[in-house]
Amino acid sequence: MVLADCSSTSSPAPVAPAPTPRQFVVHHPHVPAGSVRQNPNVYAAADSLQLDKAVADIPKRVYVPNNLADTVDVIDPISYKVIGHFSVGRSPQHITPSWDLQRLYVDNTSGNTLTVIDPRNGQPTGLIPVADPYNLYFTPDGTKAIVVAERQRRLIFCDTRTWQTIKSVPVRWRGLDHLDFSADGRYLLASTEFSGELVRVDTVSMAVTGEMPVGGLPVDVRLGPDGSVFFVANQSRNGVSVIDPVHLREIAFISTGRGAHGLYVSRDAKSLYVSNRGEGTISVVDFATRRVSGTWKVGGSPDMLQLSPDGRQLWASNRYNATISVIDTATGQLLHVIRVGPGPHGLSYFPEPGRHSLGHNGIYR
């Protein structure tokens, strides 16, 4: 079996130019009607400062997968202390909240397993055998889990109750990485980091319906609040692409900083936080203007991002520094630096507002 791998933990790649124009490939040009209709805010349920009653009794914790140590650190966000530590499978990449917000999964890529965590006590409860889980997502209706098998170059659709494979969808590009879903959940847009391509996949037929080049090293993907466009961080183009998912074209590019990597939507859904891993900064992009409204110098090597439930703190894993940074979202000031294990990657602050989780390290709607 070919195993998945994480993005290289070496220094960020040099600046890459925009993609060389070529014909976009659209295998099935029809996109389901209404799938990109404009919505007031697809993140409305996650904008609330109130937690869903299903998670009201769960203690707030920050879970950090230490990719180079095969461990997870558990942080109390009130004291900023590491209060738990346990071993998991090989090469843990992200901590993924389940669709129903009742469990956490550690994506053990090289271990071919998911470690299940009970968030009520912060302890592992078992293992689920899954091939090559670099990343993990859930369709918005909660019926399918999607395992991002990076090295196998495929998306594996599984039944969320049994974890049996429904369909395995091959993707011809290298570095299958991150994704997000359309407003109605009928399709997803995925990045292929090492090929500079984006791939659109129908979640009903479970088939590739189109692909397009963006060049560079595309990483994190996030649907815009009105549901009309996707934002894609690009590590070597040093910014964020704005993508029209129907016609599969880049309609704008926002320069942010060296090594643009992780994305997170502000609690009021007015801003997009972008971690610039190569220069130790966080850019704040205004959704309305699609311009950078501020850049925070926070140091470290910020990778994946999470917000506190009240939206006042942004938490970032520093991939090359074995630390977690806590940043004040009102001022951009660095509040705390917390020492964790080597290679911290897709941390998860849990629980968060929202009706359900779409996966990754915590995307809520």
Image (cartoon, rainbow, N blue to C red):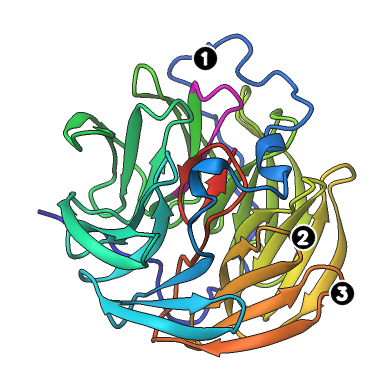
> In the structure shown, which secondary structural element does the residue marked by tag 1 occupy?
loop
Query: Between tags 2 and 3, which lies in front?
Result: 3
Query: Between tags 3 and 1, which lies in front?
Result: 3
Residue found at x 66% / y 58% = 309
Q: In terms of depth relative to the viewer, which is nearer, 255 or 202? A: 202
> In the structure shown, which secondary structural element does the residue marked by tag 2 occupy?
strand
Q: Amino acid at mark 2?
A: Ser
Residue found at x 79% / y 68% = 329
First in sequence: mark 3 vs mark 1: 1
Q: In terms of depth relative to the viewer, which is nearer, 300 or 211? A: 300
Q: Which numbered circle lies on residue 331?
A: 3
Farthest residue in the left direction?
1
From the image, tell me which residue sits under label 1: 29
The alpha-carbon separation of the residues under discs 3 and 1 comes to 45 Å
Horizontal side, residue 55 vs residue 238: left or right? left
Q: Which numbered circle lies on residue 255?
A: 2
Q: Is residue 233 visible?
A: yes
State if disc 3 and disc 2 touch (CB < 8 Å): no
Q: Amino acid at mark 1?
A: Pro
State if disc 1 and disc 3 touch (CB < 8 Å): no
First in sequence: mark 1 vs mark 2: 1
> In the structure shown, which secondary structural element does the residue marked by tag 3 occupy?
loop
